[in-house]
Image (spheres, rainbow, N blue to C red):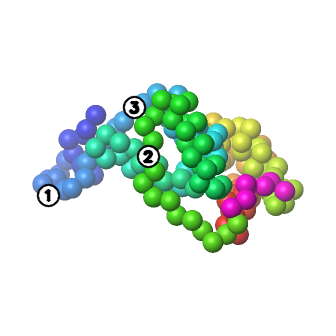
Amino acid sequence: MEFERCHDFTGRATNYGNASCELFVEYDHRNTMSDALLSHGFIHDAPVRVRDGREYWPVVATGDREDLNARLDSLREEKDADISVRRVVSSNRSHSQPNQETLSERQREVFELARTHDYYSWPRGITTKELAKKADISKTTLLEHLRKAEAKLLDQE
């Protein structure tokens, strides 16, 4: 559904010349690629762009090309999806699989708690506030533990 007024909900300004519009999109969350990407080792890294009826999902993953191609083939089959790779960027870092052994004990606990409560699902199964309460820490501390854990698992530190 496209809204008539773009960015001005008071109705006082005109929208002539605006290049963007407000959209409301409904979808069945069971059809989202987010969970499928994550379960195949791809981590969603930036906003999804939609252009000409196609979705563009920037993701981060580890592994060599053969491994990545095998995981993509599995995704194509599982989701009956037309997936094409537009660009591959390689870092100079080691391409080993993410290893939770690099995490501190607390980072591992918080990361596993987040996974257990579907924090990385779309839509999220739990808010950061609720997750922090379960971990008995502040929301800021929770987010710091998750950020550091994610950085280590993505070999960014």
* Spot occupied by residue 76 in the image (x, y as percentages of width and height): 51, 35
- Magenta stretch contains residue 107: no
Give the mark nearest the N terminus, 2 or 3.
3
As helix, strand or loop, the secondary structure at mark 1 comes to loop
* Residue at x 72%, y 44% (from the top left corner): 114
What's the magenta region? 95-101
The part of the image, by quadrant, that contains residue 17 is: bottom left
* Residue at x 45%, y 58% (from the top left corner): 87
* Left or right of 112 in this view: 143: left
In this orientation, does residue 66 appear? yes
Residue assigned mark 2: 84
Disc 2 from disc 1: Cα separation: 34 Å
The part of the image, by quadrant, that contains residue 146 is: bottom right
What's under tag 2, amino acid-wise?
Answer: Ser
Which numbered mark, 2 or 1, is in the foreground of this view?
Answer: 2
In this orientation, does residue 143 appear? no
As helix, strand or loop, the secondary structure at mark 2 comes to loop
Residue assigned mark 1: 17
* Left or right of 136 in this view: 64: left
* Residue at x 55%, y 39% (from the top left corner): 73
